[in-house]
Image: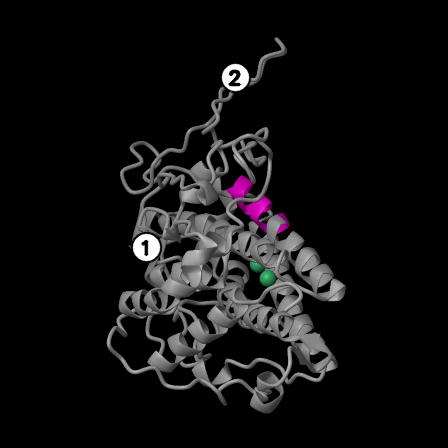
Amino acid sequence: MFKKWNLESGLRKSATLTEKRATAQLGRRSFLKRIGLGGTALLPAAGWLAGENSSQADHGGRDGGLDRGDVAILRFLAAAEILETDLWQQYNELALGNAAFQQGLFALDGDMPSYVNQNTRDEFSHQDFINAYLVSKGQRPVSLEKFRTLPSSQATGANKNAKRLTSLMNLTVDTSWYTRYRSTGNPDFGDSFPQIVNLVNVPAIPNSDLTIGGDDIQVIANTAGFHFATIEQGGSSLYDSFLPKATSAEVVKIIAAIGGTEIQHFEVWQDKAGNAPPVPLDTGARFPALPHAPDQTPNGIDPADPIDTNQIMARPCKFISTRLPLCSVIRPTSTANAGAVAAATGLTQSGLFSGQSKEFFQVLLDLAEDADDARRGF
Ligand SMILES: [Fe+2]
Ligand SMILES: [Fe+2]
C-alpha cells in the first residue's frame, strides 16, 4: 500500500513504519509534483541554512551537544514558527489597523483583535526562543530571510511595503478540524472528515479598503477566523508528532511546552470560529449558517448535537488501539498525518506559499524530512 492523500482534509493517510523508507522517495516526488516541481532536479539545500555544519552532522549522532535528531526537529520547528510568525503578523496589522477587518472580526468576538495580537506575540516568542536555544547549543539560527519576497496587502493598516514569506490572499482553508474534533474518529486510524465550510481560493485578509459592515469583508473575516484554528490545530498535531522522537529531556520539555500553547491557541480559535455569522445574514449564500446548539434548560440533559458549534472540547476518539476506550486527545499525532512533511504539504496545498520559489519548497521539504526521520536515542 502506498501512502495516499486524503484530498478532503489535505492530510496524509497512515502508512506503516516499514513502508516509510521504501516510500520516502515516492513521498518526496509526490510532494514536489503537488507543488508543481515534478521532474525538477533537486538542488542541494546545504548552505541555505545559516549554521548548517556538514562535518559535524556527518560524523556521530550528536551535534553541538544535542542529538542530531533533536537538532533536526528544532530546525524544522524554527522554520515553522518563522512562517507562522509571518502570517500572524499580517493578520495582526489588519486586525488592529483596518477598521473594516476589525469590525468583521468583532462578529466572532469583541476580543478578537487582542487575541490576534496575543497569538502573534506568542509566535514571535516561539521563533525567537527556538533559534536562541539552537544557538545556546552551538547551532546557528534558522533564517528564511532570503525567501521574504511576497507582497503585502495594500489595505489600510498593513505595512504595505513589507515583504512576506507567506500569502493570505488566495487560500484553500481546510476546515475539517471542525468535524474531526467533534468525532470519535481519528485520522491515524484512517478516518477522514468532511469540511464544515468550503473555503476554496478565497482571501483571508483584504487587499484594499472594503466597506465597513459589508458582506465582502465579513466573508474575509470569517475565513480568517477559521484559518486561525486551521493553523493552530496543525501546530498542535505537529508538536505532538515530535514528542516520541526527541531524545534530550530538555528538548522534550520544549516540544511539550510550546506545543501546549499551540493547543491553547487552537482551542480559543475553535470557539471563536463557531461564532462566524452567515453571509448574507438572511440566506448564508456566501458563508453558511453554522449548527448552533439549542438553548440549555435545567433538565439534566445537554441538548447539543456533537456537531454543534458549542462542542469545543475534544470529543473522545480512537487512540493507540481500538481495543482501548475512546479518549479525549489531540488527533492526529502520527508522523504520516501530523509530522513535518504532512504539515509542509498541507500548508503548501492551502496556497499559503503561493509565489514562493522552487528553492523555498526544496528547503522546506529537506527540513521536514530530516525532522520526520528523527528517532529517540539514535
Ligand atoms: Fe507557534
Ligand atoms: Fe501557533
Question: Under tag 1, what secondary structure?
Answer: loop
Identify the image quadrant of the C terminus.
bottom right
Q: Residue 260: where, in percent of width, then height? A: 66, 52
Secondary structure mostly seen in magenta is helix
Please identify the residue farthest to the top as the structure is shown. 299
Tell me the crowding category of disc 2: few under 14, some 14 to 19, or many 20 or more residues within 10 angstroms, Cα based. Answer: few
Badge 1 is on which residue? 2
Give the left or right position of residue 36, taking residue 339 as reference.
left
Specify whether tag 2 is near ligand 2 (CB below 8 Å): no
Number of marks: 2
Q: Amino acid at mark 1?
A: Phe
Q: In front of the other: label 2 or label 1?
A: 1
Q: Which residues are magenta?
A: 264-272
Residue 279 is drawn in which quadrant? top left
Badge 2 is on which residue? 303
Residue 325 drawn above or below residue 73 = above
Image quadrant of ligand 2 equals bottom right
Give the left or right position of residue 266, taking residue 99 as reference.
right
**Between disc 2 and disc 1, whose residue precedes?**
1
Residue 47 drawn above or below residue 23 = below
Q: Tell me the residue at 52%/67% (across/down).
A: 373
Q: Nearer the viewer, residue 9 or 188?
A: 188
Q: Residue 67: where, in percent of width, then height? A: 67, 73
Give the left or right position of residue 353, taking residue 79 as reference.
left
Q: Amino acid at mark 2?
A: Pro
Q: Residue 74: where, in percent of width, then height? A: 61, 70
**Does residue 270 show up magenta in the picture?**
yes
